[in-house]
Image (tube, grey):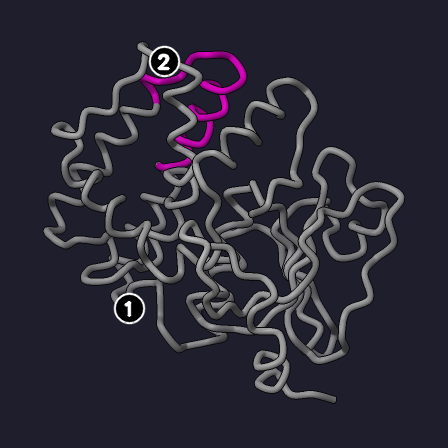
């Protein structure tokens, strides 16, 4: 049986997505097309590598991708159509959620669900490039901020599907603008991205779609959000973020298809 290191060397270019279209090293391995109802479970190598069941446009699943890539953990990826879920998904995700991380290298081959549970497990299991703060208080405060950011996800959904929610989104931005100013660092994690940065980034990646759906009713004031603007400009260039990145055009196409009731997940570059 091939080792993870050997497998990584063999497949390292299969699954790279970058906004600049350059080929860069990736630790994701697998097929790109989302699997749907009536499909069979894909045959994956028996190499012990974790298997991430995901969806390309699910921000919660993106958290798991970013963490695995930050840790440089070779893993397989299986994309799921969340509108027409395959019948076998229940075998690896009892609640039919993504992300689900199937730990086939462990004795009982358990599956983990819920993005933050998966992220915390990975951060402890793979100590390289730690993401969560070492200080218990800071760690707790960052987790609280992640919870507070959840309102942004709901606001974004309302903006796309109902054409409202811009005020709620800006209120969340106010909290994080103030927090970043208070910390006095380029990233929430300090001099480089950490747990809080990667946990909230997926929603910022799709933020450009807001302008399309709200038009003149939405205004992201770069002076009001000077710290967040600088943060976005920095983190979008981060190697980990670029390892699993969709362009604004891809996000817009996805959200337009979702609003039209014809969700198209197969929009990979």
Say which of marks 1 and 2 sits in front.
2
Is 160 on the left or on the right of 15, as rendered? left
Q: Are marks 1 and 2 in contact (CB under 8 Å)?
A: no
Give the residue displayed 56% in from the left and 42% down from the top: 58
Foreground of the two, 82 or 259 = 259
**222 lies above or below 22:** above
Estimate the spatial distance between the alpha carbons at disc 1 and disc 2, rounded to whole Å: 42 Å
**Position above or below: 145 against 42:** above
Instruction: Give the secondary structure at mark 2.
Output: helix
Q: Which element carries disc 1, helix, strand or loop?
A: loop
Q: Is residue 13 above or below residue 173?
A: below
Q: Nearer the viewer, residue 78 or 199?
A: 78
At x 38% / y 53%, what residue is drawn?
198
Residue 134 has which mark? 1
User: Is residue 155 a member of the stretch shown in magenta?
Assistant: yes
Magenta-tinted stretch: 149-168
Percent across and percent down for residue 23 are 48, 64
Main SS, magenta region, reads: helix
Residue 177, percent from left and from top: 19, 37
Residue at x-position 31% and y-position 58%: 139
* Residue 173 x %, y %: 26, 31
Q: Which residue is mark 2?
A: 215
- Residue nearest the observer in this picture, 25 or 43: 25
| First in sequence: mark 1 vs mark 2 | 1
Q: Is residue 153 magenta?
A: yes
Quarter of the view holding residue 75: bottom right
């Amino acid at each position: 049986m091939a080792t993870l290191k050997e497998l990584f060397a063999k497949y390292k270019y299969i699954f790279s997505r970058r906004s600049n279209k350059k080929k860069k090293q990736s630790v994701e391995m697998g097929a790109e097309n989302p699997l749907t109802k009536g499909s069979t479970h894909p045959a994956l190598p028996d190499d012990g590598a974790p298997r991430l069941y995901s969806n390309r446009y699910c921000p919660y699943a993106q958290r798991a991708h970013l963490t695995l890539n930050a840790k440089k953990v070779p893993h397989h990826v299986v994309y799921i159509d969340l509108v027409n879920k395959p019948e076998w998904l229940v075998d690896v995700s009892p609640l039919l959620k993504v992300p689900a991380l199937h730990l086939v290298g462990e004795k009982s081959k358990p599956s983990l669900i819920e993005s933050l549970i998966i992220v915390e497990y990975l951060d402890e299991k793979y100590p390289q490039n730690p993401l969560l703060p070492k200080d218990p208080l800071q760690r707790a405060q960052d987790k609280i901020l992640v919870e507070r950011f959840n309102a942004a996800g709901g606001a974004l959904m309302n903006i796309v599907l109902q054409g409202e929610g811009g005020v709620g989104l800006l209120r969340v931005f106010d909290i994080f603008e103030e927090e970043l100013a208070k910390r006095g660092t380029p990233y929430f994690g300090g001099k480089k991205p950490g747990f809080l940065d990667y946990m909230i980034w997926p929603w910022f990646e799709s933020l450009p779609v807001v302008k399309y759906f709200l038009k003149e009713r939405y205004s992201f004031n770069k002076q009001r959000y000077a710290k967040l603007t600088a943060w976005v400009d920095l983190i979008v260039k981060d190697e980990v973020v670029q390892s699993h990145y969709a362009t604004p055009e891809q996000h817009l196409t996805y959200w337009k298809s979702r609003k039209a009731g014809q969700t198209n997940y197969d929009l990979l570059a």
